């Protein structure tokens, strides 16, 4: 049942965007294996506060794997060693007693570090702003059942729509490409008749914005799919490429 | 009484909203551009309002404490959103949705607002589908519905177990489209820390940049608060870690009334507490109650053996299980409203039949899996089952889930009139932050509906009625004395917090507050306990202001300072909740006073004395707030004792 472990943590500390940053080493003891990873960091912070030191800043909010706010590079993997989960859903039972854990922020040109383990992911919002929507205003839309949509299409669209915008795909990619993120949104909307109308325009605008913001090129390494906590599939990238190509051809 | 005017339009209930819209004042397009609207919050209520007002041509400034609008707490809603579409042809109607909401709220909500909510519910679904929200569909290609607690019809639309996420992304995308078009300016990682009043009207806000620590002033012809609920007063709740009640407290300090603070909802199906380092509680969507059956062992010795790890739930024979909801409420069974289900779980556990740590009951899918097959269950709840397994390390397809009630939602909030305007002219409140539609208890899948109703379909009308009189008001500079003063006061408060340099961490104090709230202001409340709570909260307040420790600097990012500022406000909310619960000598919905129950242990309302909204007016720090009452008049429904038997 309840088990506890002792750990050594190597944590990236950076006092603001301009600071060079460095690793600090901390010890935490008697961590229940039923705790989540972030609860373990809470314990570390409580310890630091009691020692009158500044606690480690990290992003988090929902702590149930849906808001996409938590991040962290844990022992070289975005969202840590468990599969299909975000850092906040990672539990300490995945670690061994006496283990050393290295904790870093996302490292990617398009996601600059703001403080300690916190990075700036506003580039994602800018990509969405460039075209990740259906251009309808509030009101004056048809009845929800006016357009039947095959269940298979709706389900596939939902799978693509599950992206939480965490950025692990970018952090995992040696090129720092945002293709998985962008393709998930393009696919979700392209699969629905409502979104089809602007399909070509959307794909072009979002890709252009992505390039402009300093994300790298996709070379199909597939690292993004492996680390995506929401199982967003590479087939989305294939669809985006088709959308993009046909849009270009029409030009 | 004079301070509270609900401004309910004339006419029969079903005509009020139409009448209102036909006669309200409008702002013409060229004037809209000259009007600034501040919207605080980017959840369903805030994002939908910001997008809609931006589309209409207002100049919108939209604020959020998260790094992106898409991360607002609405993202976490799982189960679904209600609407009176009656697509399944099972007898639903606008009136029935209205009636269920009033009844579910135990006759403590305002009729006119609730009817409007039911009226616009169908438009919301149309809007979301047009935006590309991938709701679940049937094989014929039309939208699927499921049933939810407190209703006998299937009126809940859903997108897997991620309905809130999909609805919020729809609103977020509409919002980002407006950001791109330049009608909305977005301020992320920015916290409202005060509201600025000029000549009695809300004219702006003071914010703190959470990255730099800088204070900023913003002008708006009107201010909308869509900042969510205050469930985190309890420390442990299903709310996101950043959810807070600070904006509501700032409004309250500036003269807005706080309505029904004691009305908080305890959700029956959450993953039980695992230990002291627990930081939040995870909800298992109520939709699970459609196919899961709730039980505890019939025999105490079985429950004891299970708690000792000597017996497994799967070893308990069918006849030795007590499906207590089905037993007590045959008509609604596992689908009784949340407050009823929560209290029933507490009753069984208090009586010694709890499993796990003793504070848990089973939610069992065995019979549904046998009836429908694992695949169907997986399709309906796959992600929830996965989430459960990741947290608890048990496979719910094989062994029943364990659940226990937790604080989930706050029905109380900033008092608003029919137009969603607070008692401060020009200050509006929407979504969970206001008190308006759910009375003493909210039905499942109705918060998403309310948030989007307020933002897409109510505020875009009602705010015009206010702004139409303001078209001649020029944009103010933020050098006006009121702005300068407000910023000075905020600065002094943050400096005060930093100067305490005590010994206690913010979390340790927050946990202490949470325990007091759970023990005395939780599922079962009584006079004596509530008096103790008021005293204990006062002591925590004193301890906080004399002994909190906030390391780091006032400039730059300081997460402890953020948390401390919010905790100071939670302490005030806790006090208000306890006082309000003490005043309300009746049981209704989520507010259960042990002194007022039927012989069968059901909530006993005192309609002759308490058919009113309690509205608390701030009278100064450490001064008892003043109670005002908005009497609730029911013209279209008859108040009856809720009966789910
Ligand atoms: C786990 C869970 C599941 C749920 N499931 C359902 C469901 O299935 N169906 C349903 O109908 N309801 C559900 N609810 C309830 C529902 O999700 C919420 O009531 C609703 O989403 C609240 O929306 P909102 O827009 O009012 O506020 P929120 O979504 O909480 O947004 C608040 C916004 O205000 C901002 N903010 C807060 N304070 C400040 C400040 N001081 N300064 C600046 N910005 C600030 C935040 O950044 C955020 O953008 C669920 C709730 C939870 C906790
Ligand atoms: S595609 Fe996956 S990894 Fe990338 S942002 Fe979306 S959820 Fe995160
Ligand atoms: S904190 Fe929300 S996904 Fe991890």
Image (cartoon, coloured by chain):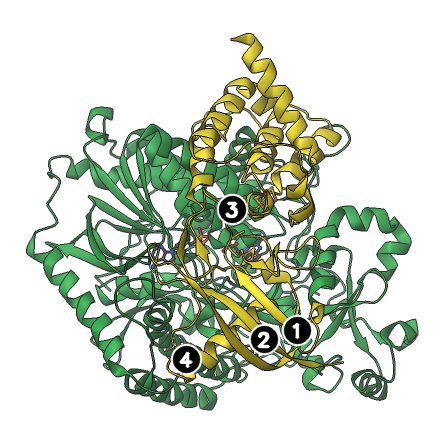
Chain colours: A yellow, B green
Which residue has dot 4 on it? A49
Would residue B249 be found to the left or right of residue B71 on screen?
left
Q: Which mark is residue B449?
A: 3
Element under disc 4? helix
Question: Where is B14 relative to A195, above or below?
Answer: below
Q: Is residue B110 left or right of residue A219?
A: left
The answer to whether marks 3 and 1 sit on the same chain is no
Label 3 CB, ligand 1: below 8 Å? Answer: yes
| Label whose residue precedes the other's in the sequence (1 or 2) | 2
Q: Give the alpha-carbon distance from disc 1 to disc 4, as whole Å.
A: 23 Å
Q: Nearer the viewer, mark 2 or mark 4?
A: 2
Label 2, label 3: how many angstroms apart (C-alpha)? 47 Å
Crowding near the residue tagged with mark 1, few <14, some 14–19, many ≥20 C-alpha atoms within 10 Å: few
Q: Are marks 1 and 2 in contact (CB under 8 Å)?
A: yes
| Percent x, y of residue B520 | 49, 84
Could one spot residue B15 in this view of the protein?
A: no
Q: Is B190 situated left or right of A186 in this image? A: left
Q: What distance separates the C-alpha of mark 1 from that of mark 2?
A: 6 Å
Secondary structure under badge 1?
loop
Q: CA distance from mark 2 to mark 4?
A: 18 Å
Disc number for residue A99: 1
Disc assigned to residue A8: 2
């Amino acid at each position: 049942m309840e088990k506890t472990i002792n750990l050594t943590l190597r944590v990236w500390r950076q006092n603001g965007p301009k600071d060079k940053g460095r690793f600090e080493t901390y010890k935490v003891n008697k961590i229940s294996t039923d705790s989540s990873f972030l609860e373990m960091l809470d314990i570390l912070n409580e310890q630091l506060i009691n020692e009158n030191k500044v606690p480690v800043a990290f992003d988090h909010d929902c702590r149930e794997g849906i808001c996409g706010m938590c991040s962290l590079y844990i022992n070289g993997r975005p969202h840590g060693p468990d599969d299909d989960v975000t850092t906040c859903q990672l539990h300490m039972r995945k670690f061994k007693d006496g283990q050393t854990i290295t904790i870093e922020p996302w490292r990617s040109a398009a996601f600059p570090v703001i403080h300690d383990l916190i990075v700036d992911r506003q580039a994602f919002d800018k990509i969405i702003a460039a075209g990740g929507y259906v251009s309808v205003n509030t009101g004056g839309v048809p009845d929800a059942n006016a357009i039947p949509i095959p269940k298979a299409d709706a389900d596939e669209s939902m799978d693509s729509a599950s992206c939480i915008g965490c950025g692990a795909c970018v952090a995992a990619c040696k090129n720092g490409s945002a293709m998985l993120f962008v393709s998930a949104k393009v696919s979700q909307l392209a699969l629905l008749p409502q979104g089809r109308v602007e399909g070509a325009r959307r794909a072009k605008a979002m890709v252009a914005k992505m390039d402009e913001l300093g994300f790298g090129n996709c070379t199909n390494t597939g690292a993004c799919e492996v680390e995506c906590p929401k199982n967003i599939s590479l087939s989305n990238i294939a669809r985006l490429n088709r959308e993009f190509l046909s849009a270009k051809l029409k030009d | 009484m004079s301070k509270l005017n609900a401004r309910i339009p004339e006419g029969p209930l079903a005509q009020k909203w139409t009448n209102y819209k036909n006669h309200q004042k409008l702002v013409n397009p060229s004037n809209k551009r000259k009007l600034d609207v501040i919207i605080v919050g980017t959840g369903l209520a805030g994002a939908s309002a910001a997008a809609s007002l931006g589309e209409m041509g207002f100049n919108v400034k939209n604020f959020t404490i998260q790094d992106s609008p898409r991360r607002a707490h609405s993202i976490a809603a799982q189960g679904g959103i209600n609407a009176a579409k009656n697509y399944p042809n099972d007898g639903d109607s606008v009136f029935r949705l209205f009636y269920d909401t009033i009844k579910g709220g135990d006759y403590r909500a305002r009729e006119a607002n609730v009817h409007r909510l039911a009226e616009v519910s169908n438009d919301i679904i149309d809007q979301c589908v047009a935006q590309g929200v991938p709701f679940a569909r049937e094989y014929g290609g039309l939208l699927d519905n499921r049933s939810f607690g407190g209703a006998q019809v299937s009126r809940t639309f859903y997108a897997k177990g991620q309905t809130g996420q999909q609805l919020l992304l729809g609103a977020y995308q509409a919002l980002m489209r407006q950001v791109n078009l330049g009608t909305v300016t977005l301020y992320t990682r920015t916290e409202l820390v005060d509201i600025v009043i000029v000549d009695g009207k809300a004219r702006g806000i003071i914010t703190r940049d959470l990255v730099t620590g800088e204070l900023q002033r913003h002008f708006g012809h009107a201010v909308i608060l869509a900042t969510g609920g205050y469930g985190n007063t309890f420390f442990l709740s299903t709310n996101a870690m950043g959810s807070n009640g600070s904006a509501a407290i700032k409004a309250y300090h500036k003269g807005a009334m706080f309505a029904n603070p004691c009305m908080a909802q305890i959700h029956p199906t959450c993953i039980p507490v695992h230990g002291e380092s627990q930081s939040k509680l995870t909800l298992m969507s109520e939709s699970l109650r459609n196919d899961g059956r709730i039980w505890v062992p019939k025999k105490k010795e079985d429950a004891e053996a299970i708690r000792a790890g000597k017996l497994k739930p799967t070893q308990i024979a069918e006849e030795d299980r007590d499906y207590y909801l089905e037993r007590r409420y045959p008509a609604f069974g596992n689908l009784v409203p949340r407050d009823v289900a929560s209290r029933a779980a507490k009753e069984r556990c208090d009586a010694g039949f709890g499993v796990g740590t003793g504070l848990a009951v089973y939610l069992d899918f065995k019979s549904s899996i046998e009836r429908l097959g694992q695949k169907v269950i997986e399709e309906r709840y796959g992600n929830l089952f996965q989430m459960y397994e990741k947290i608890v390390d048990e496979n719910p397809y094989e062994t029943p889930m364990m659940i226990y009630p937790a604080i989930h939602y706050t029905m109380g909030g900033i008092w608003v009139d029919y137009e969603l305007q607070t008692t401060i002219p020009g200050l509006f409140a929407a979504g969970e932050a206001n008190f308006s539609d759910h009375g003493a208890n909210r039905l499942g899948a109705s918060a998403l509906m309310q948030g989007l109703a307020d933002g897409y379909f109510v505020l875009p009308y009602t705010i015009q009625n206010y702004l139409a009189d303001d078209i001649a008001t020029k944009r103010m500079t933020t050098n006006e004395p009121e702005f300068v003063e407000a910023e000075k006061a905020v600065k002094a408060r943050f400096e005060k917090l930093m100067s305490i340099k005590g010994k206690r961490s913010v979390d340790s104090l927050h946990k202490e507050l949470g325990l007091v709230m759970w023990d005395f202001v939780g599922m079962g409340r009584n006079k004596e306990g509530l008096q103790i709570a008021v005293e204990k909260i006062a002591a925590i307040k004193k301890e906080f202001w004399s002994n909190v420790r906030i390391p780091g600097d006032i400039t730059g990012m300081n997460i402890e300072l953020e948390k401390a500022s919010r905790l100071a406000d939670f302490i005030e909310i806790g006090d208000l909740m306890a006082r309000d619960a003490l005043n309300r000598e009746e049981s209704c919905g989520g507010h259960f006073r042990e002194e007022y129950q039927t012989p069968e242990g059901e909530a006993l309302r005192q309609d002759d004395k308490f058919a009113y909204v309690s509205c608390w007016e701030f009278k100064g720090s450490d001064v008892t707030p003043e109670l005002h009452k908005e009497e609730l008049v029911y013209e279209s429904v008859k108040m009856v004792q809720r009966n789910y038997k």
